[in-house]
Amino acid sequence: MLFKELYTPFLLLFLHSSVKSLEPYDLLYENGIEAYYRNDYQMVIDSIEKALSSFSQLRHTKISCRLGCKQRYPLELTPRDWDLSFASVMLSRSACVKQCEESRLGALSRHRVSEDVKSEFHRRIPYNFLQRAYFKLNQLDEATQAAHTFFMANPEHMEVQQNLKTYQTKSDSPLVDRESHAYMEDYHTGLKLYDKEQFEQAIKHFEDALKGYFRADVDCRAMCWGPQKFDEYEYVDYKATLYEVMADHYIQILVCEHECIRELSTRPGRLSPIENFLPLHYDFLQFSYYRVGDHLKALECAKSYLLFHPEDKDVLENVSFYEGLLQDYLDPADVRPRKEAEEFIRRHRLESEIIHIAAQGLGFSYNEPDFWVTSGDRQDENRNTSLPQARKHYYRVPSVNELIDVKGLLSGKKAVLKIDRELREGGPLLYDEVKFVHNSEYLNGTQRVQLDNVISEEECQELQGVASMITLAGDGYRGKTSPHTPNEKFEGATVLNALKFGFEGRVPMKSARLFYDVSEKARKIVQSYFILNTSLYFSYTHLVCRTALHGQQDNRNDLSHPIHADNCLLDPEANECWKESPAYTYRDYSALLYLNGDFDGGEFVFTEMDAKTVTASIKPKCGRLVGFSSGGENPHGVKAVTKGQRCAVALWFTLDPMYREVERLQADEVIRSLDQDDYTQGRSEDLNINPKDEL
């Protein structure tokens, strides 16, 4: 019988009926972007709408297949032959999921999508293209919905914010977030009704929000059951035992499931979750039920809240108060917390225990996040000391320990704290021609400097000539020609590429070397001006030009480069900057050396941590250098280039020699060879120059 159970699912793989496979959403999205740059706006709409539909169907199919197969093959272990029973269920589920997904999606390999594309869909970038395309075709209702959907995840995007206002003046369409989560919408609607003391209506929305949350939790966990990454192992050399493989894979899945709490409480486009999100449902409900006279449910919800915060004095007092209001025939001890809350907390604590045991036994680090924060500084206005406590509902920036995150097994999230070195500035500029312009105080910040005449007009023109010959569209931006805004084209080149072009005779070697020399000059000036006690090393050097695209500059309000920090992930809402991947956390100082000023727009701006309040604005011109420390103390961006081309040498530095730029080290070898007059024609191969080496 056991072998029949094993055999049947595999037989299904060959017997399922063929259906039309789902088109991969990344290919549809790529078609839409290509159509956008051809000004074929109907094709943009058709392709990107299909891509969004395909993305949604793919997720829905994975969830339904995984949950359906889990239900079809339940795990019922018996003491006898438990290992074979376990293997039978796992193999049956595996075959079931594969058959289910392939019957609906086609070949699963077609749906493997890059992390970059996944990130763009997570950030709702496709809706930015959609709102433009709909506007071009005068479909303002659809443009309004697309713009609003994008804006909900990108509230700092000034252009879309302005577009949305324009669309609303010409369209009666309501603002619809096409990607909204029903449980989140119900929760926020409940909050508004609660603030208006419309408690009966608030109860309905909070109850619906809870039901939706637990459904979303099931889906989130199912999405964790896919392939996992084994970053520490080379697949070919992976020789772990059966138990090691199972433990490694399972613990990654378990951590992923455990972190669904954070994912489900985080609004789109945000890094920080809503504090105390799930418990607050019960907290608002306990007081709302009291206000409508349902003391039994008020007690039930208060006890549910205490599962998350058993020491909460306010709610403990509420519990005693509600117990005194019960009918005489009711025993308060018989009133239990809600079953779904008890099961959720039981599973959550068991998961936490297993993960910590695994961390000790398998030798990885895990820092348990504080999922349910309660402290802060905003009190619920409904609090009345003569009534049960309506709770102090707080909304504050989480502390560092509260926001420790876990990705896989090893990495953690930490907020940017004060710079851990003495901050000094005002050191010598080393070169007589360099002119000091502004320091940190004038620029309203920390570790900032503006200098002029770092290079001459002749050198600027020569470097611009080099740029016109060696820069490649998308270089430095993973091949994306418009990485920050679809209204500009970005082109770039590294020092090593310049020298390679010099060896090949495609640019004068003197000009290629100038790129190397001016970047070294900038490094020395930054190191000296900020009076660093150690050497400053190159982390990345990039000659980059951004060009305004014709026909796409009307009423622009976006940025050429959004506000960001160079070594951490800026979180304006939380007023924090998180030192975690994919940020270049090892970068310590940054500098921009401008080559021209004959363009419209393109001002460099520093802002506060809110990414909105501009603290300093600097107009580029030939020979002007802006230097600054790379952390969250210096958020910055670039205003839209609306006409012409803006070129600069962008430089990032590190104090840690372990993170020196590989291409720079190779370029150093080339320069040493030139200085020693060892260069002969054809020697480039002996120098082992590989322009494709990555940082």
Image: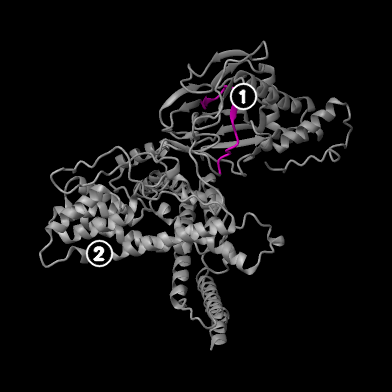
Report x, y in % for residue 680. Answer: 89, 32
Residue 583: in magenta span:
yes
Report x, y in % for residue 498. Answer: 73, 33
> What's the coloring here?
one colour
Q: Residue at x 69, y 57 (%)?
A: 234
Q: Is residue 91 visible?
A: yes
Report x, y in % for residue 460. Answer: 66, 21
With 240 as the anchor, is 180 left or right in this view? left
Report x, y in % for residue 152. Answer: 38, 45
The disc at residue 289 is none
Q: Residue at x 88, y 26 (%)?
A: 677
Q: Is residue 201 visible?
A: no
SS class, disc 1: strand
Q: Is 694 drawn above or below residue 466 in the view shown? A: below
Quadrant that contains the C terminus: top right
Tell me the amino acid under the disc marked 2: Arg
Q: Is 209 drawn above or below residue 510 in the view shown? A: below
Q: Picture quarter containing residue 665?
A: top right
User: Observer-nearest residue: 179 or 673?
Assistant: 673
In this view, the residue farthest toward the left is: 328
- State the extent of the magenta-drawn residues as a range: 582-603
Whole-number angstrom distance, CA of label 1 to CA of label 2: 67 Å
Which residue is tagged 1? 593
Tell me the amino acid under the disc marked 1: Leu
